Image (spheres, helix red, strand yellow):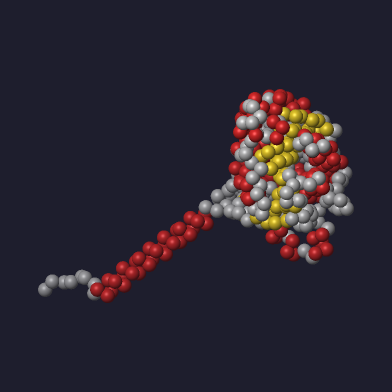
Amino acid sequence: MATHTNLPAYRLSLCLCAGVASLGILLLRSFTNSLKSDHPKIILSPKDTVLPNLPREEIKSLPYPPDALPGARDVDSPYGSTRVYEWGPEDGRKVLFVHGISTPCIALAGMAHRFVDKGCRVMLFDLYGRGFSSSPSPTGPNSIQHDSRLYTTQILLSITSSPLHWSSFSLIGYSLGGGLAADFTSHFPRLVSSLILLAPSGLIRTSHTTLKSRLLYSPTSPLPSRLVERLVAARLHTGPPTAQSVEPEAATPGILSAGKDRTGTQAVHASSHTPLLPGAPASTVAAVVDWQLAHHAGFVPAFVSSIRYAPIRGQHARWRVIGERLSAQNAAPGDTVVAREGLERGKVLVLLGVRDQVVVADEVAADVEAVLGSGNVDIRVLDAGHEVPIERVDECVGAIWGFWGCA
């Protein structure tokens, strides 16, 4: 008699259903894991890790209190949260500020307040990994480099989060922010009506680079990332007013290490301990940097990644794009689209510090004229170190206001 191995129909159906369900669960888990793996790890800012545990009075006494500037908002994104401030007359000239590599946007508070007093609408934000902005991790799985792509995205996220239309605005960038501002303008010329660069990165020469700097900041450094971060944190720590400045070593490939000049001596700058906010003596560049070192886990990783990948040096090609557009604009008849949609006054304004050991005035001035064209740039050198907009707030505002033809 023949042996039948066929299962009863109902048992076969159960087995098939169980198999399909198991396969579905496996596929769902795989899909969910792939979605998770596509997102970078976010390093939270002190807004989420420190402030909830502090009493109100202690929060008010912080070097960078969360209500330091008016019009605060937090803008979420796949790269983390961005702290944005926006205030001033809604119908005023729109001015966007981009700060430097170490100090959050509070460093430009003095200039921002003065422009509001003149009737402008201003916006400032903390770069990823600074102040109250969180940071996508630049190390580990799905890491995000802190380069022009990341910061260009952050600029666009900030302006589109406004209740107003920021379809045309003046862009002021300081130090690293200057390099970011120039890079942004080269890609989005119709958004930027006026470009002002304060001691900007972007064209810093590499001829002064030391072996120590290459060892720390090279993307191919043999040192473990955690060791690099510990060493950089130690170099950035300022301590009491008699200690080193947060000014970077001029010989670095990009903006920030110990406060030494090109001769190797200490370069202590009084502006590092100058109050950034009226009536707030604790709010200094040095204090804010030290506070970030102690309380923002994303600060040093973002700092190191910015030096490695952000537009700090070798940006001649992007700057030439701006120069070529300005040359075409200045050569075109005044009633043409090219002339009307170009940068205001057909020039870029660059303000430098004569005592700057990082963005060396004579070197940068020569390189800026070479890439932009001597007729397309207005260069002015002020009696200041690298912290030009902190040491010379009124002079910077006056120079910019006059450049706009508003004096």
Q: Position of residue 58 (x, y in %)?
A: 82, 61
Residue at x 82% of width, y 37% of height: 407
> Is residue 183 something that shows in the picture?
no
> Is residue 182 something that shows in the picture?
yes
Q: Position of residue 240 (x, y in %)?
A: 86, 48
- State the residue lying farthest toward the left: 1
Residue at x 58% of width, y 53% of height: 78
Q: Quadrant of residue 168?
A: top right
Q: Is residue 77 left or right of residue 272?
A: left
Q: Quadrant of the N terminus?
A: bottom left
Q: Position of residue 379 (x, y in %)?
A: 76, 29
Residue at x 71% of width, y 24% of height: 374
Q: Position of residue 365 (x, y in %)?
A: 74, 27
Residue at x 74% of width, y 55% of height: 71
Q: Quadrant of residue 94?
A: top right
Taking depth in this image into account, of 152 and 253 the one nearest to the observer is 152
Taking depth in this image into account, of 208 and 81 the one nearest to the observer is 81
Total marks placed: 0
Taking depth in this image into account, of 102 and 60 the one nearest to the observer is 60
Q: Quadrant of residue 344?
A: top right
In the rendered image, the vertical position of residue 129 relative to residue 253, given as above or below: below
